[in-house]
Amino acid sequence: MNPLTSQFWIGVGCAVLCGAILGFERQIRGKPAGIRTSILICLATSIFIHLGASFGGPHVDPTRVLAQVVTGVGFLGAGVILAREGLVVGVTSAAVIWVLAGIGAMIGFRKFTPAIALSVVTVAILTGIEFLERGIHRLRSGFHAGNEDRKTSDV
């Protein structure tokens, strides 16, 4: 964790990039965890994991730090889930926070390329599924839905 080395800045840059990739998608949709929050989650997780992995010795286990990060980020994700008028909202944002922590953990363990790839895959999932959901909604409210209504009203 020496800021005078390129490895330090590669890790920081990767965490900022991955957080920004996911955060930008959330920001343009007006979701609670936007660019700044996403970058900070990814960066903080990578810092904690890297710190845990950097200590050596017979009684040191970096996976314990990982377990604590998972617990802590669960509380952070729970903070964005709300119940409004009988509907639960924010579950996807909470899931994105979990993914950000996972990506940050990969960066902390120096797995930069998979972290970037998973950031892109996550955005593809978020946008692709939304496109699919809109298509399904159009089918349910379009011509076919009208025919179903007529069939049941004729009976």
Image (spheres, rainbow, N blue to C red):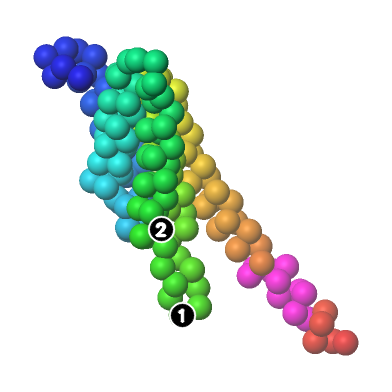
- As rendered, which of 1 and 155 lies closer to the eye? 1
Is 60 placed above or below 143 here? Answer: above
Find residue 34 and report its horizontal and vertical position in percent: 29, 50
Asked if residue 124 lies in the magenta stretch, the reply is no
Q: Which residues are magenta?
A: 141-150
Q: Amino acid at mark 1?
A: Glu
- As rendered, which of 48 and 56 lies closer to the eye? 56
Q: Residue at x 27, y 22 (%)?
A: 11
Q: Amino acid at mark 2?
A: Ala
Most common SS among magenta residues? helix
- Eye-nearest disc, 2 or 1: 2
Is 143 placed above or below 110 here? Answer: below
| Residue 78 image label | 2
Q: Which residue is mark 1?
A: 85
The quadrant of the picture occupied by the N terminus is top left
Find residue 120 and report its horizontal and vertical position in percent: 43, 33
Q: CA separation, marks 2 and 1?
A: 18 Å
Q: Residue at x 27, y 30 (%)?
A: 47
Quarter occupied by residue 145: bottom right
